[in-house]
Amino acid sequence: MSWALALPLVLPFATAVAAFLFRTSPSGRLLSLAGALALLLAAAFLMAEVLSSGVVAGQMGAWPAPFGITLVADLLSAVMVLITAMVAVAIAAYAFADVDADMERLGFHALFHILIGGVVGAFVTGDLFNLYVWFEVMLIASFGLLVLGGRPEQIDGGVKYVALNLVSTIMFLTGIGLLYGMTGTLNMADLSTAVDGADQGLLTVVAMLFMIAFGVKAAVFPLFFWLPAAYHTPAFSVSALFAALLTKVGVYALIRMFTLVFDHDVGFTHTILLWVAGLTMLTGVLGAAAQTDFRKILSFHIVSQIGYMVMGLALYTPLALVGAVFYLVHHIVVKANLFLIAGVANRIAAGTELSRIGGLYKTAPLLAVLFLIPAFSLAGFPPLSGFWAKFVLVRAALDDGAWAIAAVALVVGLLTIYSMTKIWAQAFWEPHPDNWDPTLDDLTAREKASYLLPIAGLATLTVIIGVFPEPFVAFAERAAAQLLSPDAYVAAVLGGGAR
Amino acid sequence: MEALLALTIGAVVAAAVYLMLSGHLLRFIFGLVLISNAANLTIFVAGRLTQGAPPLIAEGADAPAALVANALPQALVLTAIVIGFGLFAFAIVLVFRAWTEVGTLHPDDMTLAEPRENGK
């Protein structure tokens, strides 16, 4: 039982050590890819375990909960680990062509797997302080990846990223301290019942600390400024990795804490979340409309899309949480893919500034098609995954009578199309401003394979979720039901009826 | 004792926020170090202060007989200090690199990654 939980944690760190030892030889990247594939197997095993026997929990060092550190996976955790592993495989393969020997020598693959390990840890831990530790693991690896290479822009973006994330970390730590002082426990399942006896007013104050701390990580309005300052500066593999996973860990932590622990005053906390969600969507999409760089547009769209997920949590109805879970999974796949495509566009058309590139449709139609799939999915065109994600969320908002947020969600969808058509028109449709034709033939066959296979794989996943949404929605329904009535979660951690 | 520590934490946080908002990266780092220590103190106080009662369990017993000091916050604070040390080491080197590469420590002048409209 606990092997299924521990394996997805052990594998990335083992791979990181191995990849670091072989960082100067070409076998380092093979090790990295093999490690990612092994992680995918372990994640699939964990998913099978959770599907067959419900919430899986394991006590580390055999210390009984709530005294030791608990690892626990419900459906949401399991699907997040699985999708993380898929993205890890795609980016490890993409890095073959995108990451040069210099960056590998500096330890790109080791940092990459430490980051994945931190992300997986955050998804499977059942202990609040342990969550803080995984956040730090993830953070320190992301610091390294962000400034790897050391160009001045990277340092500049890195300073802002590091500063704001450290502040959020300290808020998180303070929140943990206060919550521990009030309840005497740090085990999340135990907390969900222990908070009932605490002073409800103080509890709301602590909930706000957590909301701000996770809000910075998730990049919600008005705490997102570190994201567009930094995400367009590092290597494309790194951008894609950050875009896919880092903010989503923040959203996951928000969902976990505000369904399991802070559900005592939903009228207050979740109303704030709803305002935050609406403003996040709007500011993100308007920010994107003002940008003229491929990666900067995509960075602002991360912010606006985070708004949709927070909206699902804020509405706090079963259907809305279904939408949030579905959106989370869909968005990880789509956003990673768009950044990977930006990397290929940069490579063959020599730039990401939209006014300086062009002509990709004429000479690289395959890339154009592969761009259209995630771009339309992001905007919410049927029959792609984004359509169903938005459909469920807007439906939930209308059912709940929240007309304003439903209207915002739809308008933001329209504005997303505006940004995507801007990229399409300038990067793909118009001729290249320097009058030459960028083409995929400049790449060697190996580079082509390592660039395009991950992109095609993720695009296929988007199409599959879009064309056959039924099993995915059914899965999200089960995951949302677990979130809303956490009895099974609590029982699995504390050993059934112990409290 | 709790009240004294609470006041100390308040003073440290105030000083830290002042430093962090003063528009200079090096002062920001100093502020960050201060505020992280305030967070550590918060955890320490949250575990309740017990004087002169070491958390020792008599031989053969499973639990301490009388009220003893809470050992958990110390473990948490220790972890936080170690992690914080690593992060600050990185942050200080990063600020130094910003000084050599970007040539300024004033965040308002750091516009390489996000250039202003109409030139500088």
Image (tube, coloured by chain):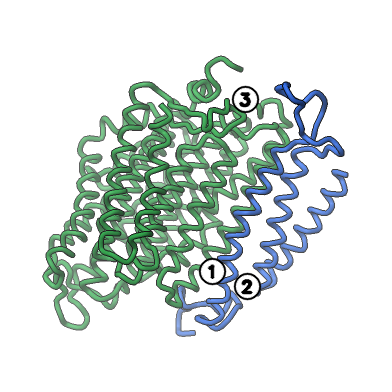
Q: Is residue B100 visible?
A: yes
Residue ID for mark 3: A193
Name the element at disc 2: helix
Quote the CA–CA distance across marks 3 and 2.
43 Å
Q: Is residue B28 left or right of residue A334?
A: right
The quadrant where residue A388 appears: top left
Q: Is residue A22 left or right of residue B112?
A: left
Quote the CA–CA distance across marks 1 and 3.
40 Å
Residue A42 spot, x, y in % from top left: 33, 37
Residue drawn where x is 83% and y is 54% of the image = B8
Look at the picture and state if A361 lies above or below A77. Answer: below
Q: Is residue A461 left or right of residue A147?
A: left
Q: Quadrant of the N terminus of chain B?
A: top right
As shown in the figure, which amino acid type bears the numbered disc 2?
Leu
Look at the picture and state if A434 lies above or below A15. Answer: below
Q: Are marks 3 and 2 on the same chain?
A: no
Q: Are marks 2 and 1 in contact (CB under 8 Å)?
A: yes
Protein chain holding label 1 = A
As shown in the figure, which amino acid type bears the numbered disc 1?
Val
Quote the CA–CA distance across marks 2 and 1.
9 Å
Residue drawn where x is 87% and y is 38% of the image = B52
Residue ID for mark 1: A159
Name the element at disc 3: helix
| Nearer to the camera, A468 or B76 | B76
Q: Are marks 3 and 2 in contact (CB under 8 Å)?
A: no
Chain in green (letter): A
The quadrant where residue A325 appears: top left
Q: Is residue A426 visible?
A: no
Residue ID for mark 2: B25
Protein chain holding label 2 = B
Residue A320 spot, x, y in % from top left: 43, 34
Residue A212 spot, x, y in % from top left: 60, 49
